[in-house]
Amino acid sequence: MKLLLHACCGPCALYPLDRLLDAGHEVTLFYLNPNIQPLSEWQRRLDGVQTVAAKMNVPLFADDLYLEREYVRRAADPNRCLYCYDLRLSQVQRRAAADDFEAFSTTLLVSPYQNRDAIVTRGTALAGDQLLFLADDWRSGYRQGQQAARDLGLYRQKYCGCLPSIEASRFKDEIRARHLAEAKQDSAVPPAPDSSPRK
Ligand code: SF4
């Protein structure tokens, strides 16, 4: 099956990709994560996905959609994760349909920290009659994937992506300190404005 696999980061891509390739699927990775703040972190996670794509010898699309202001605006919204899933899955579905894929899925389904039911419900609804949303449950391989990432020397993040998820992380002080150091280094570079969601 020709499948477009949304990749949230390198470590989470390893296990699903391994399973899908073993099953004989023709997989293309798709990095589209406008939720990841700050921009240095967005880039770091893209670097990880590029490393995985090269190692596993699969094609990779990367989309530079970035919605910092939108995510700041939604910081207190209790439903922001549903918005976040919908935004990413709908963009992946559009790309899959436009490029004649048979199916799409997301590496979010390997994480025990994500809302699997919400992801599967939305992905299935978006798939419609034309596409399949592959809802494999990869959570039993989460630790195996994280160990493989450690062995590869991949960066492994300690928060989901948006600013509120940093605040929710028990590593928030470490994360904030790193971002502060990076911001000082990059202070000469103007922040990227929001780019618009793809229609
Ligand atoms: S916690 Fe994660 S899934 Fe929820 S809005 Fe933030 S980045 Fe998106």
Image (cartoon, rainbow, N blue to C red):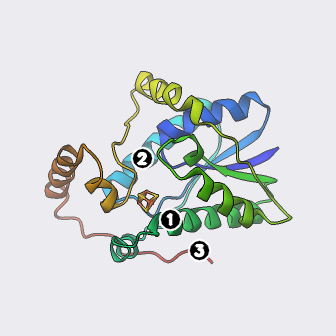
| Residue 57 vs residue 36, the one in the foreground | 36
> Mark 2: which secondary structure?
helix
Name the front one of labels 2 and 1. 1
Cα–Cα gap, marks 3 and 2 = 21 Å
Q: Quadrant of ligand 1?
A: bottom left
Instruction: Please rate how many residues cluster around mark 1, counting C-alpha atoms within 10 Å: few if below 14, some from 14 to 19, many from 20.
Output: some
Residue 198, disc:
3
* Residue ID at (45%, 40%): 48
Residue that lies at the very extreme toward the top in this rendered image: 151
Q: Nearer the viewer, residue 148 or 160?
A: 160
Q: Position of residue 56 (x, y in %)?
A: 61, 31
Disc 3, disc 2: CB below 8 Å? no
Disc 1 within 8 angstroms of ligand 1 (CB): yes
- Residue 17 occupies quadrant: top right
Q: Residue at x 18, y 58 (%)?
A: 183
Q: Which one is earlier in the sequence, the residue at label 3 or at label 2?
A: 2
Marked residue nearer the N-terminal end (2 or 1):
2
- Residue 38 locus on image (x, y percent): 31, 59
Marks 1 and 3 in Cβ contact (< 8 Å): no
In the image, what residue occupies the spot 73% across and 60% down? 124
25 lies above or below 133: above
Q: Amino acid at mark 3?
A: Arg
Vertical placement of 130 versus 111: above or below?
A: below
Dot 1 lies on which element? helix
In the image, residue 197 above or below residue 171: below
Mark 2 lies on residue = 45
Tell which circle, 1 or 3, labels the residue nearer the N-terminal end: 1
Q: Name the mark on residue 84.
A: 1
Residue 178 image offset from top left, x and y in percent = 19, 47
